[in-house]
Structures are given as structure tokens and as C-alpha cells.
Image: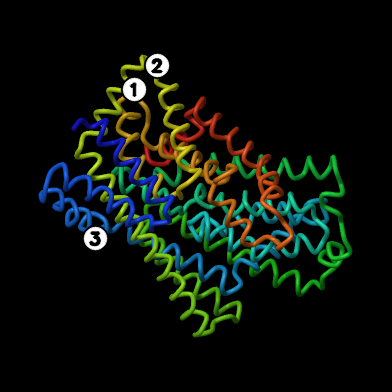
């Protein structure tokens, strides 16, 4: 049986399992081993121990539980609230100031959590109710929650970036630095949209008495808010700065972040044993799910690569006789469609070992292609009708908010993300300039 037919059987089997509601890791790994057994016989099961060794004994992947735990500490101990209050105070009495704060702070919280779903849920629990209580337009409030919380996978340290670097054997440090300018550009465009849209329609973000009272706090309260917000922001800078400067590896910086979060919890007088126990349990659950998905997807990816799918795709793209940039665009469309039905982990683990070598063979920087992949995933999982992040947003929305409202709320923010993706494709230096400057 040819590679084309085997690939079709694999994809059909996965689609069937997903429709039946099977667990993602089991579906991916089970289908690969089942097809492999009938194709190669018992020899296919040698893929399992080699995948386990590469997956669970990787120093790079050890960073995943550390960053997830750090993100959970941020949200459970009030560090995220401190960042939000400080941002509000700095921005001042500007129409839409709370939405601007949400974009800035929730993107950072999302980065600390490192996962789109957890970032949206966490950001929504902190910021959605205050915005709605102050009369903000529902679509604006929901949209900035989605945009800010999901943007965490583009702002280092990002779990999908770590997975891309590990699966393609590229530098995590270069990946993190390469994403900084696209992330900054996205944040600026999101804030610009909030400011302009609220200027055009003031009813989207009314200025309330609470905004005035927030600016009239006693000086001591303002100093305390500024101190807490500065320390929280400083921790993020330290975590990222230790990677960029080479002081610590991404894994070691995750440990630094956890120690820093504990210290901040003590300073904020929110150090409670039960909070840390619950945080640890929640982290263990998230890590268990993530690692099971990683294992299943890695088994599938390794088997698919051993079958020769990379050569098949390379031959197919070569036969199309298209310009290299159009081939990259075709990859973006494929990943965009995948994002309608599966999460960011699986897209990275399935597509990065398949598409990245082809992109490199076409003369492109793998870091550039990796950041494009993250930008694409950011769009895909928020795109109606089946982007799975939309259902996370539905989970935190008030009961009366329907899916139609949620679909409409994310459209302008998704278009902004798409604009950044297109700019980064046309002008690769937006991604590659800073890593080349920092790392040479």
C-alpha cells in the first residue's frame, strides 16, 4: 500500500475517532499503531519506547510543568489582579481603559499560563465581570478577553513554542526572541482598535463613577498598587530576560519564575498552604493531559515520518511548481483548517516535523516558520464556527450570551491577528531581525 493511501487511512481514522469523542492522545497514538501493525507487523511497536524516551526524558519539555505551575500561582495568589490594578492606574481615565488593561495584562497572564484555553479562562475570571459591570459592550468585553488570553502563546514563555523547538531541534531562545516583535505589534494594533472603536462609539466603553474613584485613591493605596504591579511585571521580565541573556535555560527560568511567584505571594500576604496544594493539583491535572496528548501526537508523528510522509509532501509541493512563498501560504491554510477542530498542542506536534524541513529546504529560516505557525494557530483556534477556543469563551460568558454573539465578538480581533501574520510572511525581518541581533 502506498504512502498516499496510508495517509488517507490515518486521517480518516483520526476524523472518525474525533467524531466519536475519543480522547485525543489515544486516538492519535492508537490509530497510528493500528495502521502500523497491519502494515509492518510487530516491528511498529518499537516506535513506542523510542517516543517515550524522546518525550518524557527531554530536558526541554521539563519546562512545560514549570511554566504551567508558575501561571497557576499567578492567578491563584492574586498576582494577576495586582498587574490589572496597576495597569488601570497607569492608563488613567481614558475611554476603554479597562479593555486596554485587559489586552496588556491578560496577554501576560496568558503567557505565564502558556496554554490558550487556560489563558482565556484565567483572564476571563479576572476581567470579564468588572467590564460588564461598568457597562462595556458585550462583544468588546468578550473580544478583548479572547484576544488577550489567547495571545499568551505568542508571548514568551510559550508552551507551543517550546514544543516546536523540541520537535524540530531548534533554539528555544531564538524562538522566544523572534516572537517578541510580532507580539508587540499585535498588542499595539489591538489597543489601537480599542481606542478608535470606543472613540467612534462611546457607548462601547462608558466612563463610570468607578473610573473616577479609581483615579482618586489615597496616595498610599496608589503606591501599594504601583509596587505590587511593578513586582509582578518585574518577575515576567526576569524570567524572559534570563533566557535572552543566556543566564538560564528555558527550563531553569521556569524554576526561577516559580520561586519568584512564591516570594511575591508572601509579599502580597497571600501565602496559604491550601492555595499551593490546590495549585499543585490543578497543575498536575493540566500537565497530565498535556503530556498524554504530546505522547499520542508524537507516536502518530514519528510513525507518519517513518512511512515517508515528508518525502510525499516534498514531492507534492515540488510538483505544483509554485513560488516558495505560495507553498508556505498553502501550509498556513492547512494549519488554519486543522485549528478549527484540534488544539494548539496537536497542530504543533503534527505539523512542525512535517512542514519545517520543507520550509528550510525552500531557503526559509526555521524560526521564522515556527513563529508563523504560532501566529496561525492563534488565528485558527479563534475562527468561527469550530475554533475550539470559542467554546472556552462561551464557558466564562454570562448564560444569556449565545454563540452568535461570541462569533461576532472575535471577528475584528481575528482580522488583526491575520494582518500581523500576513505582514510577517511578506517581511520576514519582523521575526528574524531581533534573534539575529541578540544571538548573531
Spot occupied by residue 329 in the image (x, y as percentages of width and height): 46, 27
Q: From the viewer's perspective, is 69 left or right of 163?
A: right
Occupied quadrant, residue 435: top left
Q: Nearer the viewer, residue 174 or 319?
A: 319
Does residue 155 appear in the picture of this structure? yes
Q: Does the image show residue 244?
A: no
Q: What is the total number of numbered labels drawn onto the structure image?
A: 3
Side of 431 relative to 391 (left or right) = left
Is residue 393 shown above or below 217? Answer: above
Q: Which mark is residue 57?
A: 3
Give how far across and how far down residue 60 sits, in percent.
31, 56
CA distance separating discs 3 and 2: 40 Å
Q: Disc 2 to disc 1, how far (Cα)?
A: 8 Å
Choose between 374 and 429: the one closer to the eye. Answer: 374
Circle 2 sits in a helix, a strand or a loop, which is it? loop
Q: Residues within 10 Å of mark 1 (few under 14, many from 20)?
A: some
**Residue hosting label 2:** 322
Q: Residue at x 20, y 57 (%)?
A: 53
> Mark 1 = which residue?
317
Q: Mark 1 or mark 3, which is nearer to you? A: 1
In the rendered view of the protein, which quadrant contains the N terminus?
top left
Scheme of image coloration: rainbow
Name which residue lies at 35% across and 46% down. 14
Q: Secondary structure at mark 3?
A: loop
Q: Residue at x 34, y 24 (%)?
A: 363
Say which element carries label 1.
Answer: helix
Apparent side of residue 71 relative to residue 209 in the rendered image (left or right): left
Q: CA distance from mark 1 to mark 3?
A: 35 Å
Amino acid at each position: 500500500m502506498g504512502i498516499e493511501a496510508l495517509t488517507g487511512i490515518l486521517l480518516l481514522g483520526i476524523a472518525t475517532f474525533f467524531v466519536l469523542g475519543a480522547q485525543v492522545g489515544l486516538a492519535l497514538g492508537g490509530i497510528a499503531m493500528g495502521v502500523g501493525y497491519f502494515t509492518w507487523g510487530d516491528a511498529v511497536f518499537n516506535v513506542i519506547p523510542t517516543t517515550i524516551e524522546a518525550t518524557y526524558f527531554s530536558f526541554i519539555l521539563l519546562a512545560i510543568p514549570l511554566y504551567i505551575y508558575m501561571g497557576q500561582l499567578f492567578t491563584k495568589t492574586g498576582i494577576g489582579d495586582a498587574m490589572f490594578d496597576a495597569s488601570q492606574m497607569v492608563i488613567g481615565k481614558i475611554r476603554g481603559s479597562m479593555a486596554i488593561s485587559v489586552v496588556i495584562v491578560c496577554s501576560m497572564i496568558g503567557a505565564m499560563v502558556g496554554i490558550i484555553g487556560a489563558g482565556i479562562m484565567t483572564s476571563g475570571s479576572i476581567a470579564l465581570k468588572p467590564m460588564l459591570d461598568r457597562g462595556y459592550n458585550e462583544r468588546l468585553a468578550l473580544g478583548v478577553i479572547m484576544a488577550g488570553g489567547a495571545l499568551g502563546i505568542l508571548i514568551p514563555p510559550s508552551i507551543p513554542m517550546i514544543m516546536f523547538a523540541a520537535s524540530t531541534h531548534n533554539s528555544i531562545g531564538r524562538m522566544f526572541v523572534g516572537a517578541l516583535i510580532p507580539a508587540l505589534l499585535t498588542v499595539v494594533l489591538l489597543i489601537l482598535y480599542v481606542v478608535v472603536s470606543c472613540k467612534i462609539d462611546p457607548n462601547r466603553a462608558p466612563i463610570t463613577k468607578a473610573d473616577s474613584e479609581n483615579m482618586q485613591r489615597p496616595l498610599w493605596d496608589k503606591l501599594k498598587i504601583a509596587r505590587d504591579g511593578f513586582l509582578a511585571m518585574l518577575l515576567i521580565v526576569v524570567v524572559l530576560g534570563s533566557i535572552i541573556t543566556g543566564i538560564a535555560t528555558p527550563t531553569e527560568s521556569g524554576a526561577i519564575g516559580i520561586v519568584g511567584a512564591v516570594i511575591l505571594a508572601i509579599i502580597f500576604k497571600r501565602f496559604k498552604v491550601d492555595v499551593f496544594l490546590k495549585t499543585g493539583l490543578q497543575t498536575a491535572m493540566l500537565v497530565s493531559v498535556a503530556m498524554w496528548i504530546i505522547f499520542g501526537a508524537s507516536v502518530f508523528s514519528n510513525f507518519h515520518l517513518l512511512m515517508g510522509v515528508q518525502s510525499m509532501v516534498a514531492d507534492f509541493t515540488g510538483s505544483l511548481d509554485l513560488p516558495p512563498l505560495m507553498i508556505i501560504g498553502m501550509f498556513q491554510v492547512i494549519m488554519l483548517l486543522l485549528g478549527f477542530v484540534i488544539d494548539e498542542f496537536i497542530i504543533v506536534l503534527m505539523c512542525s516535523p512535517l512542514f519545517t524541513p520543507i520550509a528550510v529546504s525552500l531557503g526559509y529560516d526555521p524560526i521564522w516558520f515556527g513563529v508563523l505557525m504560532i501566529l496561525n494557530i492563534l488565528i485558527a483556534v479563534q475562527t468561527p464556527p469550530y475554533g475550539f477556543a470559542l467554546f472556552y469563551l462561551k464557558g466564562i460568558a454570562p448564560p444569556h450570551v449565545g454563540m452568535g454573539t461570541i462569533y461576532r465578538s472575535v471577528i475584528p480581533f481575528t482580522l488583526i491577528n491575520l494582518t500581523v501574520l500576513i505582514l510577517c510572511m511578506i517581511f520576514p525581518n519582523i521575526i528574524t531581525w531581533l534573534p539575529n541581533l541578540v544571538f548573531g
